[in-house]
Image (spheres, rainbow, N blue to C red):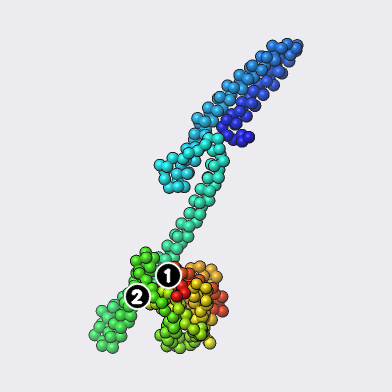
Amino acid sequence: MKFHEPKNLALLNAGIIAFAYSLLFCISVATIFSHAFTHFYTFLALFVSAALIFFIAWLIFLFTLEKFIYSKIRLIYKSIHSVKVGKAEQPVRMMTSNIFDHVQEDVENWESEKQREIEQLKQLELYRRDFIGNVSHELKTPLFNIQGYVSTLLDGGLEDPVINREYLKRTEKSIERLVKILEDLDEIAQLESGQMKLKITRFDMACLSRETTELLEMKARKHEIQLLVNDPGNVVMVEGDKDKIRQVLTNIIDNSIRYGNRENGKTKITFYDMDEHILTEITDNGIGIDPADLTRVFERFYRTDRGRAATKKGKGLGLSIVKHIVEAHRQTINVRSTVGVGTTFGFTLKKA
């Protein structure tokens, strides 16, 4: 028997009162009329009066519980349930007999859910602050450069043919940097919203990787980084948007060059047959990424402290674009890294 149910709870309390009355009745009668219990009518009076008190107490408790307590609990439960399902007007059918069986569980679940939402909101607020700070940092440098160059020209440098041409070139580079940031942000927005349409074709992933490394060869030599493409021995046919996957390779390899080892630096591309997919891994022996930063490397404008210390270049948008392009192909990308040893980025594409 569940004593928290209204009827049972009323019975329990009425029984206690009837028992207490019976006990007091017996003590009182025994004290005042010591020989009263020898008569049948004494027991009859005790039974009738105790039964009457029990019945009246049961009705009072049941009415009180239903009217003033359980109705309020049902209202609270209905409000909680309505918030959970997001429909305040949706009726909630509930059996009075098992109300506490559901209320406690639902309240605990609701509390846990709200706690998770609070934690998510805190994380989103932290991300928002970081994002605004990073955007400000990335835009501030080229804007301040442009302001400085223009001010110098207006202060007299415009009349000097050597200075004015050099400063105009620098201004142009800063403007190009701003334009590139805006183009990258627009590309991310299109990828996130699904507005960018992929041109899916069949192509050789190994061949595309070799083409990409050839385009980056001069930059790699400048940083003393050796680019290697593992020869798979046959064609590695995949399905995807060739130009977008080229951009993925370019951004990852460019990162490996920028943060690579300046002594015997290497970046290697390897392919793995994963049954229905091809896994492409780009591995370097650079500075590596701290474990605390691994979960955030694909965020817009996010650059690790080690990354900022290693180079002032880069906008922190390349890996974010990479992630969105791979996910637009309904594929996955992951990263693993060890500080001082190197980093490996791996992404999959559907086998053609």
Label 2 belongs to which residue? 180
Can the viewer see residue 195?
yes
- Say how many tags the image has: 2
**On screen, residue 23 above or below 252:** above
Residue 254 pos. (x, y %): 44, 80
- Residue appearing at x 31%, y 77% in the figure: 175
Residue 303 pos. (x, y %): 46, 72
Q: Quadrant of the C terminus?
A: bottom left
- Residue appearing at x 52%, y 33% in the figure: 69
Helix, strand or loop at label 2? It is helix
Relative to the observer, which residue lies in front, 164 or 7?
Answer: 7
Which quarter of the picture shows residue 162? Answer: bottom left
Q: Residue furthest left?
A: 159
Residue 171 pos. (x, y %): 31, 79
- On the picture, is 27 further left or further right than 91? right
Which quarter of the picture shows residue 248? Answer: bottom left
Residue 329, numbered circle: 1
Looking at the rendered image, the disc whose residue lies closer to the viewer, 2 or 1, is 1
Q: Amino acid at mark 1?
A: His
**Label 1 Cα neighbours within 10 Å, binned few <14 / some 14-19 / many ≥20:** some
